[in-house]
């Protein structure tokens, strides 16, 4: 005779709806107040770099920390570690996030390479100082002094030439002498090398007269030569205002200093020489066949 087994009846615990349910929890934090929840949400929306609201939310893929795009780009220009957890950031960051699968990757530029440390120089072998020959001591000083003396002697020679009314001889223009015809004002203005040579000659030649502004007169004469012939009556009249102060210009008359100066400039410009001292050693002088006025002589100090 078999007995049928019936399942035991389930115990149902009825709880009244008004009876509060007490749930025991271990190690749980107390519920946050509403104000604390708002503050926590605000802190989560702020960038940890600039401490302002996040603009263009940018995520570090490795640690998922969020920052402003501009702030993080500036940060990665100096360091490749997360500002919060110091983990490596990687080669790119994620920004312009519109959804889980709609975003952009911003690949970071490589950091500037550190300068290679300089290697220490090998120890320098000290050598015994080489003794100069006696003739080299003060060679530069003697050279400078000799050049100055040479210039002074050449100026004294030019004063003597003007004082004794000696004019540079005319030399024919040909391939043997290498003298050239005197250039026109347009040709002179278009030749920088010729202007440079003439400027050097004028600065030396104008030192024959005392109390003259050499630099001003050099520029003045160059401007005249670019406009008219240096030997023309108009040019001589302009030059006489400075070189013949004791003899006022009279139309049809002569001013020996101005005419003499114009002739010397004319002769040097035609010559092929660039060195003044070489020119002085080659040029020949003779009395010019013109009447000489004793009151227009150069007063050489």
Image (cartoon, rainbow, N blue to C red):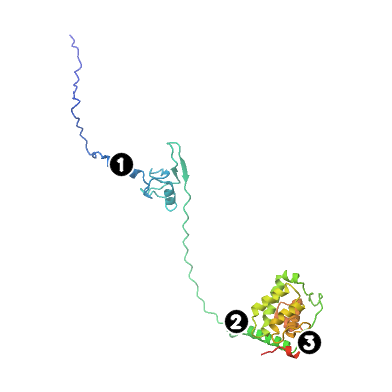
Residue 231 seen in the figure: no
> In front: mark 1 or mark 2?
1
Badge 1: how crowded within 10 Å, few (<14), some, or many (20+)?
Answer: few
Residue under label 3: 286
**Residue drawn at 71 percent across, 72 percent down:** 193
Pointers 3 and 2 in contact (C-beta within 8 Å): no
Residue under label 2: 140
> In front: mark 3 or mark 2?
3
Near-viewer residue (272 or 88): 272
Q: How many marks?
A: 3
Near-viewer residue (205 or 21): 205
- The CA span between labels 1 and 2 is 87 Å
SS label for mark 1:
helix
Left/right placement of residue 57 relative to residue 146 reads: left
- The CA span between labels 3 and 2 is 38 Å
Residue 94 seen in the figure: yes
SS label for mark 2:
helix
Pointers 3 and 1 in contact (C-beta within 8 Å): no
**Residue drawn at 72 percent across, 70 percent down:** 189
Residue 297, position in %: x, y? Answer: 73, 89
Q: Earlier in the sequence, mark 3 or mark 2?
A: 2
Residue 209, position in %: x, y? Answer: 67, 85
């Amino acid at each position: 005779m078999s007995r049928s087994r019936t399942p035991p009846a389930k115990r149902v615990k009825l709880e009244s709806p008004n009876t509060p349910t007490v749930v025991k929890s271990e190690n749980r934090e107390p519920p946050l107040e509403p104000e604390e929840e708002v503050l926590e949400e605000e802190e989560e929306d702020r960038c940890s770099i600039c401490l302002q609201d996040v603009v263009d939310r940018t995520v570090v893929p490795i640690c998922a920390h969020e920052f402003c795009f501009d702030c993080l780009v500036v940060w990665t220009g100096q360091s490749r570690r997360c500002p919060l957890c110091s983990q490596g950031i990687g080669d790119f960051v994620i920004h312009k996030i519109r959804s889980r699968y709609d975003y952009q990757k911003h690949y970071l530029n490589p950091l500037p390479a550190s300068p290679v440390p300089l290697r220490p120089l090998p120890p320098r072998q000290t050598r015994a100082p080489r003794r100069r020959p006696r003739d080299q001591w003060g060679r530069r000083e003697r050279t400078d002094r000799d050049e100055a003396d040479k210039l002074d002697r050449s100026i004294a020679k030019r004063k003597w030439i003007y004082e004794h009314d000696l004019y540079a001889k005319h030399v024919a223009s040909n391939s043997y002498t290498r003298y050239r015809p005197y250039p026109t004002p347009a040709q002179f203005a278009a030749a920088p090398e010729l202007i440079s040579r003439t400027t050097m000659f004028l600065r030396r030649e104008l030192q024959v007269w005392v109390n003259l502004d050499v630099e001003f007169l050099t520029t003045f004469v160059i401007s005249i030569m670019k406009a008219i012939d240096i030997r023309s009556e108009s040019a001589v009249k302009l030059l006489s205002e400075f070189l013949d102060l004791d003899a006022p210009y009279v139309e049809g008359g002569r001013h020996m200093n101005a005419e003499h100066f114009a002739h010397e400039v004319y002769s040097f410009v035609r010559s092929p020489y660039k060195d003044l001292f070489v020119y002085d050693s080659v040029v020949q002088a003779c009395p010019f066949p013109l009447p000489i006025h004793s009151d227009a002589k150069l007063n050489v100090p």
